[in-house]
Image (spheres, rainbow, N blue to C red):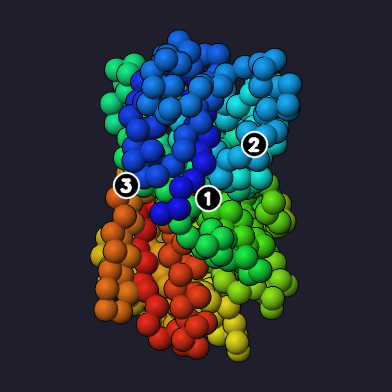
Amino acid sequence: MTQKNIILGITGGIAAYKTPELVRRLRERGADVQVVLTRSAREFVTETTLQAVSGLPVRSDLWDKGAEAAMGHIELARWADLILIAPATAEIMARLASGSAPDLLTTLCLATEAPVLIAPAMNHVMWKNPAVQENRDKLISRGVRILGPASGDQACGETGPGRMLEPNEIVAAVMAPLAVPDIVQAPLAGMTVMITAGPTREAIDPVRYITNRSSGKMGFALAVAARQAGAKVILVCGPVSIPAPEGVECINVESARDMFAATHARIDDVNIFIAAAAVADYRAVDEKTGKIKKSTDELSIALVKNPDILASVDRMHNGPFTVGFAAETDNLGDYARSKLESKRLNMIVANLVGKNIGFDADENAVEVFWLGGEQSFPLADKRQLAQDLIALIAERYLQGINADTQTELPIMMVRD
């Protein structure tokens, strides 16, 4: 591999103790590593140690008169082929998301044209905080690649997602993209991806409706990942409490019929259609204009089927590559294969749902099947999983274009 210039930004987390090993492993792979410390990072690892393993003086001060006499931060930003921040604390993620630059490391991130990768490390409750997750989504939508975090025992004695990936895992993730063409980093560049997400609400009367427990997390994560892969993304979403991802066109709808109309209004120019929404199968035959009064011990409501959005898209002449979702409590494989065949989809994502799994969960596990092969993914954060799914969808879609056929595309199964 051609030698690469990597800036390693180290911030103030206990996982900083692993960074000398990270530097050593990067250098073993042929990289030159310039370490940049934040002020808090000095509390966890010393400049002497990092200079010894990197072979370069450690930078930490934006106001270093010797370095800045020649605009050293600009020179360093241009020198880098890649900036890696490990560990990345909640604080540094917030600074990057807001575009602030109070120190050398954040200034470099703003001044560089090189890819930026971060390996988060923090307490699992901090990682799950909505503010941190919103910052994560912002960074991904801007092209920042997130590595991890892993789940397991933490320094505080608690367990959960938030551990920094191990140095060998980070090195594998960092070095692989450096060795491949830019097109691999944006496989969906020039493509339009439409994703449906969240539940629908089917009105019974002005105050009651039929719905389900879908949070929209998987669909929104897929939208962010597709945007990061270079696609123009149209997100058609039912009622959710998640903010719209940056750089994604979001169309808000209420009912299945609303979602059907919004989908077909924009579907003609779509290359890939991912139906991740949990669309209500039925709606009330007679939607009451006034509130139904509690006047009897029993109440019957007649229901009628809603339009099948996914099937209608798949029936289109020269329609898009279609990826379906299905939520099931058992017989996941049989149901997925049956739906794949009956709807004539290109792929299907089957979600295993039940107590403590599926809806509202932040993590998921994936099994992928296709004609002649299969692949499994371990339990992971839905956002990381979405990146893996989009990569696989892009791979199969592009293979289909190159082969001018879609007869050997995969069945995908997800435990949402």
* In-front residue for pair 309/398: 398
Q: Quadrant of residue 133?
A: top right
**Residues at discs 1 and 3 in contact (Cβ within 8 Å):** no
379 left or right, relative to 307: left
Q: Secondary structure at mark 3?
A: strand
Q: Amino acid at mark 2?
A: Ala
Residue 258 visible within the image: yes
Q: Amino acid at mark 1?
A: Ala
Residue corresponding to mark 3: 379
* In-front residue for pair 70/58: 70
* In-front residue for pair 59/404: 59
Badge 3: residue crowd in 10 Å (few <14, some 14–19, many ≥20): some
Identity of the residue drawn at 46% across and 78% down: 399
Q: Earlier in the sequence, mark 1 or mark 3?
A: 1
Q: CA distance from mark 1 to mark 2?
A: 30 Å
Residue corresponding to mark 1: 221
116 left or right, relative to 264: left
Q: Secondary structure at mark 1?
A: helix
Q: Secondary structure at mark 2?
A: helix
183 vs 225: above or below: below
Q: Earlier in the sequence, mark 3 or mark 2?
A: 2
Residue corresponding to mark 2: 77
